[in-house]
Structure formats: C-alpha cells, structure tokens
Image: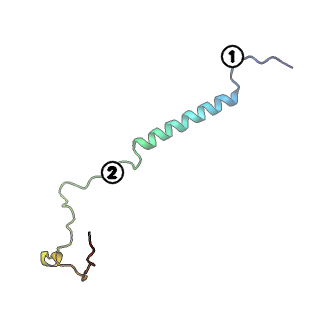
Amino acid sequence: MTDLDRGKMPDSKWFWALLLLAMLVVVVVWFANPLGSMKQPPAGMPASQSTPVDPAEAASPTVPLTLPKTPG
C-alpha cells in the first residue's frame, strides 16, 4: 500500500471546487439582473389611459347588498 501525500488534493476535488465556484458565479449574476434590462417607453409616447368611469355609477353599488344586523 502506498502512502498518499496529504499536501495535494486529488483531481476530482478540484473539479468539484471549480464546479461549485462556477455555480456560485452563475447565481450571483442571475440575482444581480434576473429579468434582463427593462426597456422604457419612448419619451414622446403617452401612457395608456384607463377606461373612463362615470362618477355616479362608481358611487352606487351595482349589486344590492343587505347585511344582517348583529349585536356587537
């Protein structure tokens, strides 16, 4: 049986160490910019408008609502 030199790492340990380091780099890059660069709309383009709402219609409920009276 041969005596192993304790000062040297086997090649497989270097492989796993480099693989772990590469995965760490990928995770850091992924979380630094997960969705990529977001494009802003051009300055001259107006934002889309919401649907017009009649204030009288918005104030009244569309479904009749009756709640039971409870003590408390």
Q: Residue at x 27, y 52 (%)?
A: 40
Q: Mark 2 belongs to which amino acid?
A: Met
Image quarter for residue 64?
bottom left
Vertical position of residue 14 compared to residue 68: above or below: above
Foreground: disc 1 or disc 2: 1
Residue linked to disc 2: 38
Circle 2 SS class: loop
Sequence-wise, which precedes: disc 1 or disc 2?
1
Residue at numbered disc 1: 7
* Most foreground residue, 56 or 10: 56
The colour scheme applied to this rendered structure is rainbow
**Residue flagged by tag 1: what amino acid is it?**
Gly
| Residue occupying the point 31% across, 52% down | 39
Q: Residues within 10 Å of mark 1 (few under 14, many from 20)?
A: few
User: Residue at 52% across / 36% down in the picture?
Assistant: 24
Q: Position of residue 5 (x, y in %)?
A: 74, 16
